[in-house]
Image: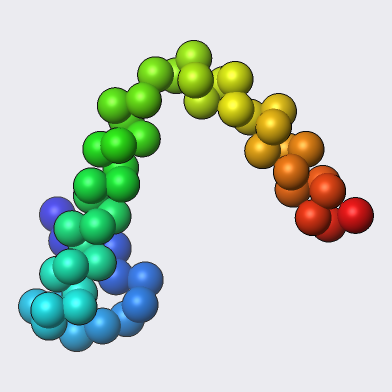
């Protein structure tokens, strides 16, 4: 499977490879955190977004 290339960099370039690796490591960090913590933080995130918009 080819990694998503949101920056439209040429495949195989150093930037493309590092951005793919970064996305993968971020995904790993998210998965390693417990779902409980994520659910707990959701109301805070929504409130934060509403404050920024308002």
In the image, 12: left or right of 43?
left
**Above or below, 24 relative to 39:** below
List the single residue furthest toward the right: 54
Foreground: 1 or 6?
Answer: 6
Q: Position of residue 37 (x, y in %)?
A: 49, 20
> Relative to residue 34, is residue 11 drawn left or right?
left
Q: Quadrant of the C terminus?
A: bottom right
User: Is residue 19 shown left or right of residue 14?
Assistant: right
Residue 28, given in percent of the width and then of the height, sits at: 25, 38
What residue do we see at 74% from left, 48% from top?
A: 49
Residue farthest to the top? 36
Viewer-closest of 19 and 11: 19
Where residue 32 sits: x, y (%)?
29, 26
Q: Is residue 33 above or below residue 15?
A: above
Locate residue 46: give its quadrant: top right
Horizontal placement of 27 versus 54: left or right? Answer: left
> Image point 30% across, 37% down: which residue?
29
Image quadrant where residue 20 sits: bottom left
Residue displayed at 49% across by 14% down? 36
């Amino acid at each position: 499977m080819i990694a998503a290339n949101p920056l439209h960099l040429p495949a195989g370039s150093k930037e493309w490879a590092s951005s793919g690796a970064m996305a993968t490591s971020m995904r790993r960090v998210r998965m390693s955190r417990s779902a409980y913590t994520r659910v707990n933080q959701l109301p805070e995130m929504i409130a934060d977004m509403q404050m920024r918009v308002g």
